[in-house]
Image (spheres, grey):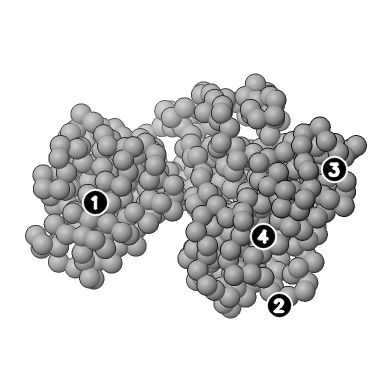
Amino acid sequence: MNPSDINIESEERVELLSVGVDIGSATSHLVFSKITVEKVGTRYVTVGRDALYESPIILTPYDGPDLIDPAALSAYVDAQFAAAGLRRDEVDTGALILTGVALDRANSRTIGEVFAREAGKMVAVSAGDNMECVLAAKGSGALERSETTDGDLLHIDIGGGTAKMVLCRGGKPLAHLAVDVGARLVVSGDDGVVVRLEEAGGRAGRALGIDLAVGARVAEVDRTRIAEYLVDELFGAARITGDGSSALLRGQPLPEFTPSAVSFSGGVSEYVYGRQEQTFGDLGPLLARAIRDRLADGDLALVENVNAGIRATVLGASQYTVQLSGSTIYVSDPDGLPVRNVQVVTPPFDLSDLSAQGVAEALRRSLAQFDLIDTKQPVAVSYLWDGLATYDRIDQFCHGIAMGIAARTQDTDSAVVLVSEDDIGRLIGSHLATERLDGRPVVSVDCVETTDFAFIDVGRPVTGSASVPVVIKSLVFPSTSG
């Protein structure tokens, strides 16, 4: 069923066809799903997600040593639609995720052209290190599992070019970090000749006195040494066997903590958990062997049967939720509607001790977590108001929002979108627009529930009403309970 053929606001139950696409530096794959939503009050909620077809996982095609090949990728995607027995015009929604070193490729933007026919339907996310860390922990089920874990759970997602780790406690990501550890930093053919070498792989070789170069032969013993070195750096950064320092860090070290269990996802996890035997000339099996050896020598428990594995960041489908925001909204420029595919952040604002500085710092942390500081991607700030709506409290809140948004120096023109669960949208929106922002458009809607990992559309006002339809497209993750 195509959304253009229905009035979703009048349907009690809707089924949507969704496609999730993960283009990584090492592998690429698709998942087709059927999402079932039902109307509850004024909003739709997901009541079912059924995987219809999971594509074979392929090595991401390259045209030369550095450029992802969009033609080969397009042929692969077309073949998967055919294998699934689906047409492109049947897709209602979906998520296109670019992850890992793939984001650094000179032609990564052309990948979007492969999915041009789904433009407007797809949520496209370039997942930088910070966001990919949380995506992996959420998509693998690690965050949910940490709710019942005795102590802290450390989740590590190891892909082709990078490894992402998240400290999980009580269902929440407390800290995260990425390191230059991956299976395809060094790839060799059956004859041992190096056919692909990433910069981080070269650094690992130099640290061990191994001269690596494309076209040169590398001995198996040296490949093993490189893998063991990478795992030593990984475990050191993870504070499993070290102090959090590593020559391969891609950010600040993790805070001090003592995890009681560890789980894995990503391509290397298939070897860690014994689900994959085929080799691809990379370091994946060697990294997994070194991981298992070091875990066997320690007291850290390995959490088994983590959801998703290599598919942890194939977020698959989007959940459509239609809500109506009522007469207490504020839109400074109605001609600026609709706004579409605006990414949502839900900062942990402390409104019990409300201060502009506190609001600004919480917002900046959330923006950084989702790699939304140095980008032009529009942002929607979701919040739950708490306490009295006095002038001083509203002014402090709006001042903090303005200061936090100011950190996004590449995006100075798009509308500032605010989303509240309470009916306070007009008060907050009008104050922000007239008192704390200089002419920048503001869209402030209320009585709407949303979370991180969501994208929001705000439509034009409903005919004969001051209400606007709000569509929430939130990434659907697997549940460990089902």
Residue identifier under label 2: 299
Name which residue type carries label 4: Glu
Amino acid of disc 2: Asp
Relative to 25, residue 273 above or below: below
As measured in the structure, the alpha-carbon distance from the residue carrying label 1 to the one carrying label 3 is 53 Å
Q: Which residue is at the front of the view, 373 or 150?
A: 373
* Of callouts 1 and 3, the N-terminal one: 3
Does residue 171 appear in the picture of this structure? no
Q: Which one is closest to the eye, mark 2 or mark 4? A: 4
Would residue 406 be found to the left or right of residue 79 on screen? left
Asked whether disc 1 touches disc 2, contact meaning CB atoms under 8 Å apart, the reply is: no
Q: Is label 1 or label 3 in front?
A: 3
In the image, which is nearer the foreground, mark 3 or mark 2?
Answer: 3
The C terminus is located in which quarter? Answer: bottom right
* Disc nearer the start of the sequence (2/4): 4
Q: Amino acid at mark 3?
A: Val
10 Å neighbourhood of mark 3: few (<14), some, or many (≥20)? Answer: many
**Residue of label 1:** 403
Q: Judge the density around disc 4: few (<14), some (14-19), many (≥20) Cα neighbours within 10 Å.
A: many
The kind of secondary structure element at disc 4 is helix
Q: Secondary structure at mark 1?
A: helix
